Image (cartoon, rainbow, N blue to C red):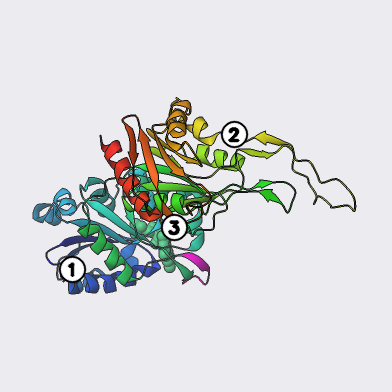
Amino acid sequence: MSLSGRRILLIVSGGIAAYKALELVRLLRRAGGEVRAVLTAGGAQFVTALSLQALTEHKVYSEIFSLTDESEMGHIQLSRSADLVVVAPASADILAHMAAGLCNDLATTLLLATDKRVLVAPAMNVRMWQHAATVANMATLRERGVLVVGPDEGAMACNEWGPGRLAEPPAILAAIETALAAPALPLAGRRALVTSGPTHEPIDPVRYLANRSSGRQGHAIAAALAGLGADVTLVSGPATATPPEDVRLVRVETATEMLRACQAALPVDVGVFAAAVADWRVASAAGTKLKKTPGGAPPELQLVPNPDILATIAAAGPSRPRLVVGFAAETGDLRAYAEDKRRRKNCDWIVANDVGADDGIMGGSENEVCLITEAGAEAWPRLRKEEVAGRLAERIATALAG
Ligand SMILES: Cc1cc2nc3c(=O)[nH]c(=O)nc-3n(C[C@H](O)[C@H](O)[C@H](O)COP(=O)(O)O)c2cc1C
């Protein structure tokens, strides 16, 4: 009985998946939860108040201007008496109302008046889900700390295929259990930018300059920040590590593209620059494959400096993140170099790691870092990259809370 004594306010909005809300109520009740249901006018086109009432064993609320409801339980009280507000299915329409702060019916008024956390389970046609308006609305809601489960990808009722299917009721139940088990996440409502992986700087259409970075450390940091509730944009070069799922992933190839993607992700509260960005690129990459000719001299590559992403983002200005964390990968005299880099690049912290040839850090699964802050240098023991990420994310949460 994982939800024993927990009260869930379930808002059922208008969509073909509304029938699955009935199964969700059954699962919630079986887990010991008490469910109060609110049915929107759209929702009532798909399921009946009677079904919800029978399964919840409570009156179902629909009308904002019902005198009976207001005298029995006013809308403010209804919005606050739950431990968690769940919108399942969440139609494109109700999500748009939430993002805009509109409240022209009972459900949207409750959502604006509540002081509790809100979990939405979107369900809609794939085009509706991918529409720029819905994408922007979801970004706004996530930024405000609204929790999201799904949607799933698959065949849709409208014979199309793609993301937009309501998450299955057991997955929604699991998300509700997680939301109720976890204390409010320390980075909820915060935005983070993380860079990760190497960059590829083209020589010609088939060759490039690169490095051994796997992206594992940066990806783990993005995952750890998202795990603490941050809304994370992960700008990744061509990394071999699998990116985490609960982040906004922007894939890039070159340092120039990475800088552009970082600037587009601003403003953020914290920026963590873990990517191994190439310092130089070929001055003018050949448009066609460079040919080896018998007896011919090898081509001479002229290199020019790449943009300095860390220094550019860390420069003082209105869009500078509150906390800028750079990485320094060196093969000797690590601490002195990292301390100098912190000052030179105007960043707040540097995570310094020695990437000498024999330590297996570059591209490996472990890391041994030294955290350089204004207060001094802290050597951390050799840890798995996920553990380094977890520690760093905790430190970031503490710093942003301060
Ligand atoms: C047959 C049918 C199926 C629909 N399915 C969905 C859906 O899955 N998701 C969605 O966002 N809207 C869907 N709509 C549109 C919504 O019902 C409509 O936007 C409605 O105003 C939503 O109201 P509500 O969000 O206030 O409940 C559907 C409409 C019809 C006629």
* Marks 2 and 1, the one that precedes in the sequence: 1
The circle drawn on residue 157 is none
Type of amino acid under label 1: Ser
Nearer-the-camera pick, 197 or 26: 197
Instruction: Answer left or right for 64 relative to 222.
Output: left
Nearer-the-camera pick, 13 or 168: 168
* Marks 1 and 3, the one that precedes in the sequence: 1
Type of amino acid under label 2: Pro
Name the residue: 41% across, 47% down. 232
Q: Which residue is mark 3?
A: 365
Q: Which residue is mark 1?
A: 2
Q: CA distance from mark 1 to mark 3?
A: 35 Å
Q: CA distance from mark 2 to mark 1?
A: 52 Å
The quadrant of the picture occupied by the N terminus is bottom left
Circle 1 packing at 10 Å, graded few (<14), some (14-19), many (20+), is some
Split into quadrants, the picture shows ligand 1 in the one at: bottom left
Q: In the rendered image of this protein, does residue 372 appear above or below residue 343?
A: below
Magenta stretch: give its range: 157-163
In the rendered image, is residue 188 in sight?
A: no
Q: Which residue is mark 2?
A: 307
Circle 2 packing at 10 Å, graded few (<14), some (14-19), many (20+), is some
Nearer-the-camera pick, 234 or 303: 303
